[in-house]
Image (tube, rainbow, N blue to C red):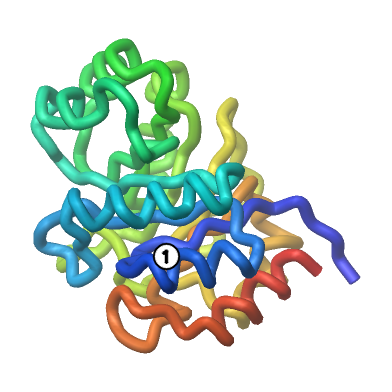
Amino acid sequence: MLETNTLVKICGITTIEQAVKVAELGTNAIGIISVDESPRYVSPEKKKEIFKTLKNLYPKIDRVSVVKNSPLDSIIKSFLGETSETIIQLHGDEDIDYCQKLKQRIPNVGLWKAFRIKNKEDLEKIKPYENFIDAILLDSWNKETYGGSGIRIEQNYLEDISFSKPWWIAGGVSSDWIDVILEKIKPNGIDISSSVEISPGIKDLEKTKQIIREIRK
C-alpha cells in the first residue's frame, strides 16, 4: 500500500459543528469561502466564530480564508492585528503586484494563490508569482465559477510539473482519482470540496472520512 505525507484541505465549510467534525478526521487545513456570490459563502462574523473554535481546539490545523478579487485595502484592514486565519487564499485574478503588496503588509499570515488551468500554457504563467506567495493551488478553469465546480484539470497537464513552492491540486478530487493523484501527479496537498458534499457547504462526513483515509493510506 502506498504511504503518503500528502496534505489534505477540506474547503467550503459553513458551520462550527462541521468544522470540528472535519478537524477530528485529521485534515491539515480547513477553508472558509469569503466570496459573496459563492453558495458556500460565510459572513465575516460567522467565519471568525468558526476559526476561533478551531484555533482553540485544533491549533495545528491551518485556517484558510478564501477571497476573490477583493480590494487590497479591505483585505489588509481586515487582517491587521490579531486574526483568526493562518492563511489567505487568493482565488481570483490577483496579479503579482497585488500579491507582493499583500505579503509585505501582512507577513505573519501565509499567502496561497489559486490558478485556474485551462491549458498547459496557463502553468507557465505561475512561475513569476513564486517569489511572492507561500503556496500554489491549481484548480480547473470554468466559465461559470472560480471554484467548487467539481471539474478536473486535464491530467496530462499535471504530470511532471514542479514548482519552487508547495502546491495543491483542487477541482473534482474524488475517491476514484486519489490513487492516480498520489502515484502520477504527486502534489504536496489535495484540496477537496464539492465531491464530499450533500449540498453546497454541507459535507457528507462519512465520504470525507473515507477520502482522507484513502489519501493517508
- Quadrant containing the N terminus in the rendered view: bottom right
Say how many tags the image has.
1
Could you tell me residue 180's position as x and y percent? 68, 69
Asked if residue 208 shows in the view, the reply is: yes
Q: Quadrant of residue 214?
A: bottom right
The percent position of residue 166, horizontal first and vertical second, equals 58, 36
Say if 23 sits above or below 200 in the image: above
Residue 53 falls in image quadrant: bottom left
- Residue in the image at 60% along x and 52% along y: 28
Judged left or right of residue 49, residue 39 is left
**Can you say which quadrant of the picture contains the C terminus?**
bottom right
Q: Mark 1 points at which residue?
A: 171
Q: Which residue is drawn at 45% across and 79% down?
A: 195
Q: Is residue 104 depicted above or below 16 in this figure?
A: above
Q: Point out the residue furthest to the top here.
A: 104
How dense is the environment of label 1, judged by Cα within 10 Å: few (below 14), some, or many (20 and up)? many
Identify the residue at horizontal 71%, vertical 59% (top origin). 184
Q: Quadrant of residue 109?
A: top left
